[in-house]
Image: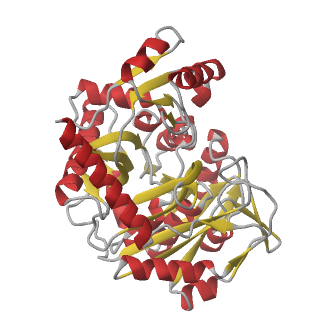
Amino acid sequence: MTRVLLLGGGAREHAMAQALAKSGAELFVLSKARNPGLARLAKDVKLAPETDVKAVAEAAKQWRVELALSGPEAPLEAGCTDALADMGVRLASPGKLAAEVETSKAYLRGLMARHGIAGAVRSQLFASPEGLKDAIRGFGTVAIKPVGLTGGKGVKVSGDQLRTPDEAEQYAKDCLAQRVGGTGGVLVEEKLEGEEFTLQAFSDGTRIEAMPVVQDHKRAFEGDAGSNTGGMGSYTDSDGLLPFLTRNDVQTARGIVQEIVTALAKEGRPYRGPIYGQFMLTGQGPKVIECNARFGDPEAMNVLGLLAGDYLEVCEQVADGSLKPGAVRFESLATVCKYVVPPGYGEAGGKAGIEVFADERAILEDAGARLFWANVHEDKGRITTGTSRACAVLAKAPTLAEAERRCEAGLRHVRGEGLRARHDIGTQALLRQRVEHMQRVLHQGRSRN
């Protein structure tokens, strides 16, 4: 039985832990809060910041772990996986240098430019305000991106959060002055028009095995209203596509992720672990918004919920650089995942300390869905919210409509003062809006050409 260390304490990590436990792993968890789902699955749990390199190393030594995975990106940037590798622990997550595809947006853009990788967007890097005004006006509509990590909430775009070029310039200056993302750099990029989708893959440092494509919904409220969040929910379809995607679009995205992995190896940064391409389908095909050095959250729950093979075996092959063709298989089912969040989430910080009541038996047996605990803390049997997403309900079914119905049935068994979810995710009405939006984008592109 392989002794596995998992870093992180959210719903993504709960899904990873469930898949590892199903594969027979002896699981140990280090996280900053006590997640009840992880606590049930793990042989032992240590409470400490996942970015505390010393605590991670001590826990790995104490538990005599053989394999390690990180759910979130911050431990990668902190050097936790490098420290574990120095101890002889095998890794199914990338080291610090390879993880710069996420932790430094400037590195990703430079990598794609140096290796001529398709799907690049026009961008310009700034370390000072000089030249910002001209660049922003030259692009016309822009996305302003702090170079470093911002928890998925640092990007602002024209016509949405930024109403005028002056507002875009001021936000870029604020990012530089406040060192948002921790680096003091900011990217000005062309604003992409289209529909976002996620393509995740396992990489063994040389080749990838892709997962079903997912669409995440980041807006806080129904109808895609409100500010961006870490993700309110996501869905996959039974054919491995999305309503607005063609097989050629997906194949193009897979090729881009493979090219990124190949380029990293050429630069002496072999990438082993899950890698996550965030794409925008535009009138010119898929473009890379960003690349993440981990599973997405909530997207991990969708794909791991469909994984038909042995997850531990896949992780071991990834760690050993020997990922076999056909080792990664997925069920041909649709999935819908919806997060439950505390009041205030998506506007300011969510309200912490709200007690959450979830009938996990009813969610599983009556609704045919599963619950994953997220940013909560369990103490003496009482589960309370943190300031972020509290829990997620995932359902799978032969059709997207049935998966959405089961997910909604599961949500009815989660209670707590002021808790809410986005009930429109996965519905036919919202899917039609996505398809119609993509059709308008394609029509406008043809008109310009």
Q: Residue at x 38, y 72 (%)?
A: 306
Residue drawn 28% across the image and 33% down it: 120
Q: Position of residue 259 (x, y in %)?
A: 23, 40
Compared to 405, does 260 lie above or below? above
Query: Where residue 83 sits: x, y (%)?
Result: 53, 39
257 vs 8: above or below? above
Q: Is residue 30 left or right of residue 69?
A: right
Left or right: residue 365 versus residue 278 is right
Residue extending furthest toward the top:
130
> Quick one: quadrant of the C terminus?
top left
Q: Tell me residue 193's x, y (percent).
A: 35, 42
**How is colour applied across the structure in the image?**
secondary structure
Q: Residue 192: give x, y in percent of width and height.
A: 36, 38
The front one of 94 and 406 is 406
Q: In the rendered image, which quarter is residue 371 located in?
A: bottom right
Residue 63 relative to residue 20: left or right: right
Q: Which of 58 and 218 is in front in this view?
A: 218
**Residue appearing at x 24%, y 48% in the figure:** 442
Instruction: Mark yes or no: residue 321 visible.
Output: no
Q: Most extreme residue toward the front, as rendered?
A: 447
